[in-house]
Image (spheres, rainbow, N blue to C red):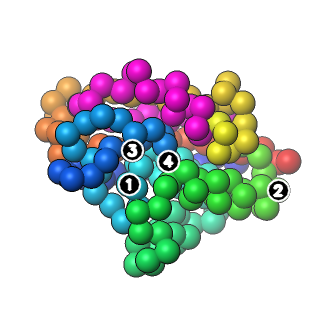
Amino acid sequence: MRIGYGYDVHRLVEGRKLILGGVEIPFKKGLAGHSDADVLLHAIADALLGACALGDIGQHFPDTSDEYEDIDSRILLRHVSELVNDKGYVVGNVDATVVAERPKLADYIPEMCKNIAADLGVGLDQVSVKATTSEGIGFEGQGKGISARTVALLMEA
């Protein structure tokens, strides 16, 4: 088995949709980025890539490429899942935490988990998404951005 860790962060800005775990969440701001800036899916992708020693999401989907501008991060996650499978591994489980002071995310987590499970081709019992605040501390607590941290366990197919 192999274990990977992923981390991503994006700034909150006006004029963008807020997408987390492939779910559009009603909010006055969205995340800045070249793609749809889904920090949760980006952190998961990085954990999976790291577990296979395949680099990071920026190496596979560079922000200098027009091909990935405004792309749905679920497409990227599905591609990463294929890379993992091609290396002879399957996802054992994914455990993720999103850090955001606002908006509250609890109501959206079940749909996020469904999206992630579907994109990775695993059961819902293999995907955990949690949300927390930073108690007003740091950039998340000040409402300047959102971050996500993820660990993933891969097993030989």
Front one among 90 and 63: 63
Quadrant of the image containing the N terminus? top right
Residue for point 20% across, 39% down: 28
* CB within 8 Å, label 1 to label 3: yes
Residue mark closest to the camera, 1 vs 2:
1
Query: First in sequence: mark 4 or mark 3?
Result: 3
Residue mark closest to the camera, 2 vs 4:
4
Whether residue 125 sits left or right of residue 40 in the image: it is right
Q: Is residue 27 above or below residue 9?
A: above
The disc at residue 88 is 2
Disc 4/disc 3 C-alpha distance (Å): 10 Å
> Three-letter amino acid code at disc 3?
Ile
Disc 1/disc 3 C-alpha distance (Å): 7 Å
Q: Which residues are magenta?
A: 92-116
Residue 65: % across, % down: 45, 78
Tell me, yes or no, whether the highlighted magenta stretch contains residue 105: yes
* CB within 8 Å, label 4 to label 3: no
> Three-letter amino acid code at disc 4?
Leu
> Three-letter amino acid code at disc 2?
Gly
Q: Which residue is mark 4?
A: 41
